[in-house]
Amino acid sequence: MIEKIKQFKNLILLVIGISLFCLILTLDPLGYFAVRRQYRAVILNQIAIVQAETDKRIAIIQAETEAELLKIKKEN
C-alpha cells in the first residue's frame, strides 16, 4: 500500500492542489467576484435608465407629432 502511495505521490499532490485551488475560488476570500457582480449590476442599471429615458423621449416626440397632425387635419 505504501508503495502505491509513493508511486502516485505526484498525482495525489496534483489532485490536492487542484482541489485547494477550486476551494479558494469558491470561497472568494478577496471578494473579487462579488465586486465584479456588483459592478456589472451598476452598469446594467445605468443602461436600463438611459434606455427608459430614450423611450420616454421617443414617446413624447410621437405624441407631439400626432397632436400636430390632428391639429393640421382639424384646420383643413
Image (cartoon, rainbow, N blue to C red):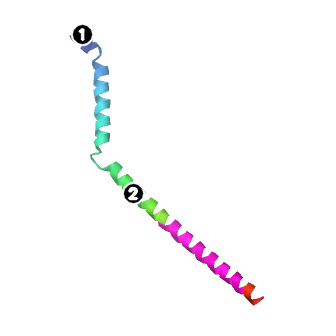
Q: Secondary structure at mark 2?
A: helix
In depth, the one of 26 and 3 nearer the eye is 26
The residue located at (28%, 33%) in the rendering is 20
Most extreme residue toward the left is 2
**Which residue has dot 2 on it?**
39
Question: In percent of the image, x 53 and y 66: which residue is there?
Answer: 51
Checking the image for residue 32, the label placed there is none
Q: Main secondary structure of the magenta part?
A: helix
Q: Quadrant of residue 24?
A: top left
Q: Quadrant of the N terminus?
A: top left
- The residue carrying mark 1 is 3
Span highlighted in magenta in the image: 49-71
Numbered disc in front, either 2 or 1: 2
Badge 1 element: helix
- Give the farthest residue toward the bottom: 75
- The residue positioned 30% from the left and 31% from the top of the image is 19
Residue 66: x and y, percent? 67, 79
Q: What number of labels is visible?
A: 2
Please tell me whether residue 7 is drawn above or below residue 65 in the rendered image: above
Residue 7 image offset from top left, x and y in percent: 28, 13
Alpha carbon distance from label 2 to label 1: 52 Å
